[in-house]
Amino acid sequence: MLLDAAREAAAEAVGCRADELVFTSSGTRAVHSGVAGVLAGRRRVGRHLIVSAVEHSSVLHAADAHEAEGGTVTQVTVDRSGAVGVGAYALALRADTALACLQSANHEVGTEQPVAEVAAACREAGVPLLVDAAQSLGWGRVEGDWSVLTGSAHKWGGPSGVGLLVVRKGVRFAAQGPADERESGRAAGFENIPAIVAAAASLRAVRAEAAQEAVRLRELTERIRARVPRLVPDVEVVGDPERRLPGIVTFSCLYVDGETLLHELDRAGFSVSSGSSCTSSTLTPSHVLKAMGVLSEGNVRVSLPFGTAQEDVERFLEVLPGAVAGVREKLGAPVTETVVRDDVLVVDSLGKLCPIPVIELAKVIGEVPVGGLVRVLADDEAARLDIPAWCEMRGQEYVGEEPAENGTAYVVRRLT
């Protein structure tokens, strides 16, 4: 009875039939089961899968597994705000496309995707659309004629270890792995009844306050978006300024190591994140920021939960400038070896991690005449993202990259 009641409550919040929804052990498990089940159910149509370049790692890992098993994958690019173009997504649809995937909103920068428009294009092509709604489900239903939907309870404040998978009636689906009598055979193992009940109750609770809280949190994140660039020099605020989730704001600081800045903010009492929201423990550059073509160094992602006080945001804005300045002072720029070869200034940053190559580029760009070139030698993979982003921010021309001994040469032309 408890399970049935929780399923009905969750289905009402999602906007689906109760018999279309099953509970899983996590949002990631829901994604993996959903992708694999639809691909298997539509195998006769073809083995082509479409994803966006900014999907959660669970979707991208499922795509990698599909490709390793002989399937094909098309990754749709995004603009600098992190959104896919509806036309570009429609062009990726093919006669052998078995499934398309698109998140409802981005986990890292908060940009909302044009799900309804993409779903219409997929429906016209006869292709089911799987929507990863983990980040947005607490704020409201996902609009559009989607076919499969996944979510994760911890994203809306519920317990960890509960996900949900919705498969609309009429979608060809073949559950993978040994069959199980529970959850329509789509989620093996005994249901975690206490956690499922808590997940459904918390979803209903946050939905009751979502409209009012969204207005309040949107005002707070807009305050951060507007004031951070004025308080801290050389900062890029990323994500769509309008079509975005209420409680997420992300910005990147030039000449700053993100993890070092996080430690400084942690000491001041603020828990924020850096790097990819789904792989932050790996200390690798965010695949989302890379796909957007924006600055990845010194990245800070601020998530405001329900009930965040305005006073906390004001104190964060007071602390941030000093924290950034302190990190920049600590990092400094080591003595840089610069030579001129054929009228090109060469900066040797081999063996140095970002943001040092960018710091050294910034220190020497004024030494070349307008129209002159700087060649930065670096072997840190993050330089491939950060040097072009620095050029975009500072009005310089990124010419391109060239192979170099023990690394890569990034060529920049001074324009101002």
Image (tube, rainbow, N blue to C red):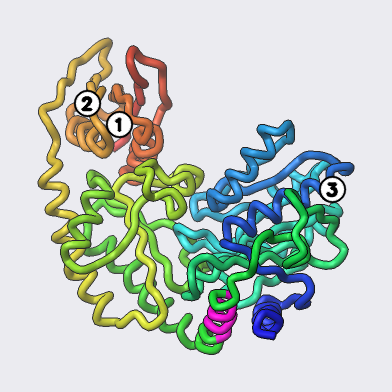
Asked if 136 appears above or below 306 in the picture, the reply is above
Amino acid at circle 3: Arg
At which x and y percent is residue 234?
26, 51
Query: Considering only order in the chain, which callout, 3 or 1, is on the residue closer to the N terminus?
Result: 3
Amino acid at circle 2: Val
Please tell me in which quadrant of the rendered image residue 46 appears: top right
At which x and y percent is residue 333?
14, 35
Q: Which residue is mark 3?
A: 42
Q: Which residue is mark 1?
A: 414
Does the magenta segment cover residue 80?
no
Asked if 213 appears above or below 221 in the picture, the reply is below
Nearer the observer, 202 or 142:
202
At which x and y percent is residue 137?
58, 72
For residue 368, the mark is: 2
Residue 227 in view, yes or no: yes
Amino acid at circle 1: Arg
Q: Residue at x 73, y 49 (%)?
A: 177
Q: Residue at x 29, y 25 (%)?
A: 376
- SS at mark 1 in the image: loop
Q: Which mark's residue is nearer the viewer, 1 or 3?
A: 3
- SS at mark 3 in the image: loop
- Magenta residues (range): 196-204
Tell me whether circle 2 and circle 1 mark residues in contact (CB < 8 Å).
yes
**How crowded is the residue under tag 1: few (<14 C-alpha within 10 Å), some, or many (20+)?**
many
**Image check: 65 left or right of 106?**
right
Q: Which mark's residue is nearer the viewer, 3 or 2?
A: 3
Q: Residue at x 26, y 49 (%)?
A: 259
